[in-house]
Image: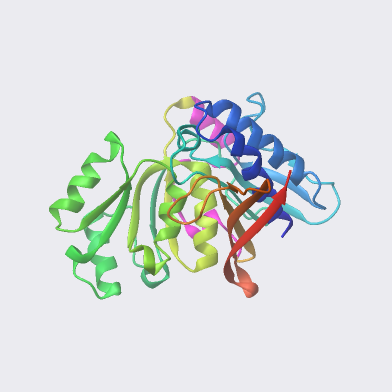
């Protein structure tokens, strides 16, 4: 619940910047509040993957130590504002998100591109990111007891994904495009009401680790492959202990424990969560999702109310 408070206060801190067109200031406000709140928690936390290096303040940088220094040792994967452009434009689906697990459990990697494939619990064990998309679609359709044409595949709307989009359409299945925030798309594969069977595509590695943690808690499946773009990114991977940067990573290699959890709070209204709202009394209302793995496996939507 300490971490729920972190995401709630971070989302509230971003509220004044919604629709203001300045995503740098918005991200800074959210990041600063998140850092402040996490440093109040009794833990020895380390950011193992995030959206910045040490010289890129105000980002929560990779290897940054958080917490009071007392309490459990934990890995933290963080994205203070998932969908900064959405927030700056006042558009839907911006979130404040983080994932936490025991120390040494989460993939420690640079902020770079990552190839991803995700499905919900009913299709767990049916995907292989090394195989062509059509073969994966056939395998997923089989275990879901559907025809391929009845599948819905969510893909980020980017030129780099045009081939994937074309393959889905040629197979007779449905494409559900999104412009940003692939964490939402990954989690959607595990929520029947959202009607998403699979996510495929290339996005950020921090979002990949965070969403893989959510899927681990929900019982879904996730595979990934880091995609270093140059020699410098390869060297960064090796320095972080990844000797084979382009090795295919299964969910149990990205999140090595079931004892983990995911927290998200909506900043703007979206597919999963409502955004921060200010009522006539000045109270700030939040809507969050907490997903816990391990023996305490559960998922819960939580509403909060704060007065500035």
* Residue 73 % position (x, y): 76, 53
For the N terminus, the image quarter is bottom right
Quadrant hosting residue 14: top right
What is the x, y in percent for residue 217? Answer: 55, 65
Protein image colouring:
rainbow
Q: Where is residue 23 drawn, in percent x and y?
A: 53, 29
Q: Is residue 239 magenta?
A: yes
Q: Residue shown at 67%/53% (left/top)?
A: 104
- Span colored in magenta: 232-257
> Is residue 39 found left or right of 131 in the rendered image?
right
Q: Nearer the viewer, residue 280 or 95?
A: 280
Q: Is residue 124 left or right of residue 94?
A: left
The one nearer the camera, 109 or 41, is: 41
- Residue 60 appears in the figure: no
Q: Position of residue 120 (x, y in %)?
A: 40, 66
Residue at the front extreme of this rendering: 280
Q: Can you say whether 270 is above or below 257 in the image? A: above
Give 185 or 84, whichever is nearer the viewer: 84
From what the image shows, is residue 52 above or below residue 266?
Answer: above
Q: Quadrant of the C terminus?
A: top right
């Amino acid at each position: 619940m300490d971490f729920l408070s972190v995401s709630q206060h971070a989302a509230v801190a971003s509220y004044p910047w919604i629709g203001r067109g300045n995503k740098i200031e918005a991200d800074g406000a959210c990041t600063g509040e998140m850092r402040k709140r996490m440093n109040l928690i009794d833990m020895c936390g380390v950011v193992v993957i995030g959206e910045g290096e040490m010289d890129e303040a105000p980002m929560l940088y990779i290897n940054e130590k958080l917490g009071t220094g007392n309490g459990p040792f934990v890995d933290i994967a963080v994205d203070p504002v998932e969908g900064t452009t959405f927030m700056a434009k006042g558009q839907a689906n911006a979130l404040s998100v983080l994932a936490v697990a025991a120390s040494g459990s989460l993939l420690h990697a640079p902020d770079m591109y990552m190839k991803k494939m995700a499905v919900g619990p009913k299709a767990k064990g049916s995907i292989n990111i090394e195989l062509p998309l059509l073969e994966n679609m056939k395998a997923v359709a089989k275990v879901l007891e559907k025809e391929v044409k009845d599948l819905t595949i969510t893909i980020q709307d980017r030129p780099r994904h045009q081939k994937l989009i074309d393959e889905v359409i040629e197979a007779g299945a449905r494409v559900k495009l999104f412009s940003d925030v692939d964490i939402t798309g990954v989690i959607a594969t595990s929520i029947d009401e959202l009607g998403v069977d699979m996510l495929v595509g290339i996005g950020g590695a921090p979002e990949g680790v965070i969403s893989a943690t959510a899927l681990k808690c929900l019982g879904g499946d996730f595979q990934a492959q880091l995609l270093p773009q140059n020699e410098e990114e390869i060297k960064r991977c090796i320095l972080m202990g990844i000797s084979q940067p382009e090795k295919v990573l299964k969910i149990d290699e990205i999140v090595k424990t079931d004892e983990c959890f995911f927290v998200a709070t909506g900043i703007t209204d979206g597919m999963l969560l409502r955004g921060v709202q200010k009522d006539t009394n000045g109270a700030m209302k939040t809507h969050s999702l907490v997903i816990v793995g391990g023996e305490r496996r559960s998922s819960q939507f939580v509403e909060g109310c704060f007065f500035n």
